[in-house]
Amino acid sequence: MTQARFDEAAASWDEKPRRRQLAAAIVTAMRRVLPLSREMTALEIGCGTGLVTCDLAPLLKRIVATDTSAGMLAVLAEKTAALGLENVEPRRHDLIGDGDLPEGTFDLIYSAMTLHHIEDTRALLAACGRHLKPGAPLALADLDKEDGSFHDDMTGVAHCGFDQGRLAELVVASGFQAPRFVTAYSITKEDAAGRSSDFPVFLMYTIRS
Ligand SMILES: C[S@@+](CC[C@H](N)C(=O)[O-])C[C@H]1O[C@@H](n2cnc3c(N)ncnc32)[C@H](O)[C@@H]1O
């Protein structure tokens, strides 16, 4: 269900300026708080069309850009070819269910606006811990807890954002250091009646113990 929704959305995903602005703000926040370098091999969970990954690629050695939507990955592959980004490897993969990525090898795992689409946050954090090298950073950007009005279509939405305190507890219980949070961006959306609301997006970052 989630895959079909994102497969359909893939071709026009990048057309919304809000999505491009959000991704750029997340990259800015990541550059500010993480020690990114050309020595690092990174894994993105839920890369979509690569709005974040295409900006990070010149700063990293290699990125395994994973998503469960073949449509999103096809758009990413076209973009990396057009941009000459040879260090990005688009890959259809679910970090919880699929066991075919090497564990303990990544220098960085990140995701942008994907955590709220994955039901089992605890299992995802555990999988991140297994795939990171000890001492390597994890950076997750997502919505602050919201009232359910962010998505017009709730298909595939598992969480209405996240309470930072509860997420921090889960992160520590999953074998990471106490995380820090910065607000990377605030999305302003109007409902059908023209009422506008703000939806802050955090970047949570931590280190695998
Ligand atoms: C809201 S989009 C965000 C895409 C991209 N990160 C961006 O910022 O534009 C969420 C993405 O997560 C992907 N996704 C959903 N569940 C997933 C899972 N279990 N593993 C990997 N990707 C998943 C979807 O296919 C979709 O591309």
Image: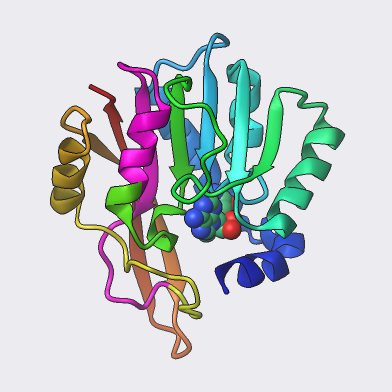
Point out the quarter of the image occupied by ligand 1. Answer: bottom right
Closer to the camera, 67 or 149?
Answer: 67
Foreground residue, 148 or 199? 148
Q: Residue at x 55, y 19 (%)?
A: 41
Q: Quadrant of the N terminus?
A: bottom right
Q: In this orientation, which residue lies closer to the viewer: 90 or 111?
A: 90
Where, by quadrant of the figure, is residue 169 drawn?
top left
Question: Is 169 above or below relative to 189?
Answer: above
Q: Residue furthest right?
A: 82
Relative height, residue 134 to residue 143 (above, below): above
Magenta segment includes 131: yes
Q: Position of residue 120 (x, y in %)?
A: 33, 58
Q: Position of residue 182 (x, y in %)?
A: 28, 39
**For the magenta stretch, what is the residue range?**
124-150
Residue 55 visible from this viewpoint? yes
Q: Specify the farthest residue to the bottom.
A: 193
